[in-house]
Image (tube, rainbow, N blue to C red):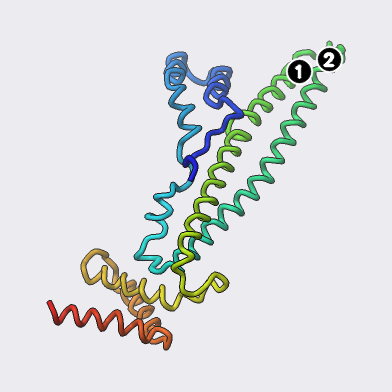
Amino acid sequence: MEKECKEIKKYDFAEDSLSVINEGSILSDKDFDKLVEMKDGLKHGFKYGQVFRTDYEARHSVLVDAKFTTPDSKYWQSVREQSVHFGELVSLSFEYRKNVVKLARYKVRKAKWQHKIDSGDYKDNFEKADLELKIKDITIEEERVNWFLANQERTATARMREIEQWHVIKEELLPDMEFGTEDCGAHQHKSYLLRFAKQLEFIKEGQVDMGSSEVFNLLSQLDMAAKLPENRELVGEIYGQKIKNEIED
């Protein structure tokens, strides 16, 4: 796997953003000086800061054994996670293209206003023309720097990293799958039975606090899963081994 967060090189984000803040005079000189002192840290945060899940979080926070009890259930959750990020990347690509065109359009409008000023078209209303030109300059800077194109590139890179991350996880799970990769529900009779049984175990051990209605719902789901003909052997393995362990204890 490559770096968790690939750096964006097109813009000096911290430097350009500080320039925007300074031009706006929105902070006192004292506060702005503090920002300048933190410039390197801000730049580092933009380049390497976490946007989406790390590989560790994907494996140990999303694909937890208590919820996704089998390789098949982990695989299909990975498919869902990857699909979401891919869809968002496609949507982001459309938005990025729009912003690139908007940026070009603002530059054309700025050039037209500049031409009018230079040619003397607005000699009787120079102040208005000058203000319009400044607005175009600010809009161009906003599009180019402040959380638009630069941040969209950063987000796209982070989504690509997570798409690749879920691909690696899926490939690792394939050899241990029982029910194939064409029917996303084929594994659920088994994985859900194991999940419900595990949740009940947590409750009995006092690790989970549930209300009576939640417990009733869990027991109902476990009962339905246990009655499925395809789970008969698995139910025997789970509860037969459990009874054996209780006798031996």
> What type is the residue that disc 1 sits on?
Lys
Sequence-first tag of 2 and 1: 2
Residue 226, x across and y down, in percent: 37, 83
Report the residue marked by disc 1: 128
Q: Amino acid at mark 2?
A: Tyr
Residue ID at (53%, 46%): 161
Mark 2 vs 1: CB contact within 8 A: yes
Q: CA distance from mark 2 to mark 1?
A: 8 Å
Q: Is residue 71 above or below residue 117?
A: below
Q: Is residue 84 above or below residue 37?
A: below
- For label 2, count other residues whose C-alpha is less than 10 Å away and answer few (under 14), some (14-19) or many (20+): some
| Picture quarter with the C terminus | bottom left
Q: Quadrant of residue 25?
A: top right
**Disc 2 marks which residue?**
122
**134 left or right, relative to 150:** right
Residue visible at 14% across and 82% down in the picture? 247
| Residue 204 place in picture, x, y as percent | 22, 72
Residue reaching furthest to the left: 249
**SS at mark 1 in the image:** helix
Image coords of residue 32 (percent x, y): 47, 18
